[in-house]
Image (tube, rainbow, N blue to C red):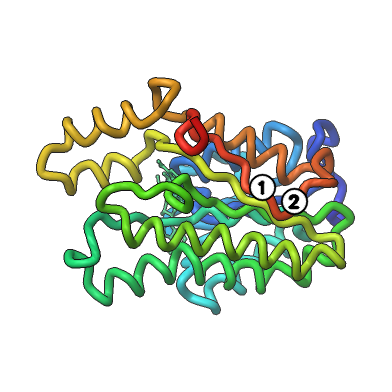
């Protein structure tokens, strides 16, 4: 529990403080909203916090910059009174095969999707150790386990997120800090729209994305947020080192 009484005092997250990287838009914003609805005080850490509603605390943060991440985590602790839950959600995509992608592309995507998690987690750990219910949830993807066309870099980055999740869970289980990840299928956000725009035939690519979901539809940001809210809550106290697929059946059906 954080050191300050919860503003609302109700809900399964009452008294808890959460920080969500990439919380300014898309899935991260849905996660921030869900945790707030369940009683947490929530900070959204993002390059752009301009679209945030008032009940969320926006903190400017670039996960590729260690000093920026440390300053953001310090600001969360100061403004909200501690930190119980870290959601490492910030992520970017890249389209292409190994022949299409430059070294700069590789460094840029891995820096956000993988090293960004390490930076935010390292900054948060001292605060999480002071919490009674510490939890970390990383944003993975079905790309970690499924070979998707033209996603070689993105998938490699998410494979690393999966391995990182298991290894972090192992390192910190002894101090009571749980680490899990969520692996969504395709979720219709700005992220997907930007990716689609890079294809020669975006309409055809969108149809392929829809068809990939066994359920016949894309996953909603709220469904991913629900899964994160479960894994980060004291209710999942025996769950650590897992990947929860919210993927419309893509991975196992
Ligand atoms: P989005 O592009 O809609 O939102 C991402 C947010 O992260 C933006 O607010 C952006 O400003 C922020 N961000 C980007 N770089 C940052 C940085 N260096 N520091 C801080 N914030 C930064 O993306 P979306 O769809 O919400 O994706 C969120 C996460 O979910 C990502 O990790 C993505 O890989 C993952 N994911 C998305 C899927 C999808 O189909 N949309 C499927 C599976 C996983």
Q: Is residue 80 visible?
A: no
Expressed as whole percent of the image width and height from the top left, the position of residue 139 reads: 54, 51
Query: Residue at the spot x=66%, y=61% of the render?
Result: 166
Q: Which mark is residue 17?
A: 2
Query: Residue at the spot x=53%, y=73% of the render?
Result: 68
Q: Quadrant of residue 71?
A: bottom right
**Which sits in the foreground, 18 or 155?**
155
Query: Residue at the spot x=35%, y=74% of the render?
Result: 107
Tell which residue pokes out farthest to the left in this image: 200
Q: Is residue 193 left or right of residue 199?
A: right
Q: Is residue 157 above or below residue 143?
A: below
Q: Is residue 183 visible?
A: yes
Instruction: Please tell me which of labels 1 and 2 falls first in the chain.
Output: 2
Asked if marks 1 and 2 touch (Cβ < 8 Å), the reply is yes
Q: Which mark is residue 16?
A: none
Q: Residues within 10 Å of mark 1 (few under 14, many from 20)?
A: many
Q: Quadrant of residue 174?
A: bottom right
Q: Is residue 227 left or right of residue 63?
A: right
**Which sits in the foreground, 56 or 118?**
118
Which residue is denoted by mark 1 in the rendering? 42
Q: Is residue 232 above or below residue 214?
A: below
Q: Is mark 1 within 8 Å of ligand 1?
A: no
Q: Quadrant of residue 88?
A: bottom right
Expressed as whole percent of the image width and height from the top left, the position of residue 196 reads: 23, 41
Marks 1 and 2 sit apart, C-alpha to C-alpha, by 6 Å
Q: Secondary structure at mark 1?
A: strand
Q: Is residue 92 left or right of residue 178?
A: left
């Amino acid at each position: 529990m954080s050191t300050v009484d919860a503003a609302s005092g109700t809900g399964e997250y009452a008294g808890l403080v959460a920080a969500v990287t990439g919380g300014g838009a898309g899935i991260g914003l849905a996660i921030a909203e869900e945790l707030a609805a369940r009683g947490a005080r929530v900070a959204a850490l993002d390059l752009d916090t301009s679209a945030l509603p008032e009940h969320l605390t926006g903190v400017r943060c670039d996960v590729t910059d260690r000093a920026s991440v440390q300053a953001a985590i310090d600001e969360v602790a100061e403004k909200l009174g501690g930190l119980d839950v870290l959601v490492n959600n910030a992520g970017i995509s890249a389209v292409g095969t190994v022949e299409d992608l430059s070294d700069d592309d590789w460094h840029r995507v891995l820096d956000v999707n993988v090293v960004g998690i390490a930076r935010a987690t390292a900054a948060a750990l001292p605060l999480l150790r002071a919490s009674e219910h510490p939890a970390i949830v990383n944003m993975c993807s079905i790309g970690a386990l499924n070979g998707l066309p033209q996603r070689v870099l993105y998938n490699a980055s998410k494979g690393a997120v999966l391995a990182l999740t298991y290894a972090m869970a192992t390192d910190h289980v002894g101090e009571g800090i749980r680490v899990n990840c969520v692996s969504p299928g395709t979720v219709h956000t700005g992220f997907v729209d930007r990716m689609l725009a890079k294809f020669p035939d975006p309409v055809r690519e969108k149809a392929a994305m829809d068809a990939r979901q066994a359920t016949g539809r894309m996953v909603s940001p709220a469904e991913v947020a629900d899964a994160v809210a479960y894994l980060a809550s004291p209710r999942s106290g025996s769950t650590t080192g897992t990947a929860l697929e919210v993927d419309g059946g893509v991975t196992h059906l």
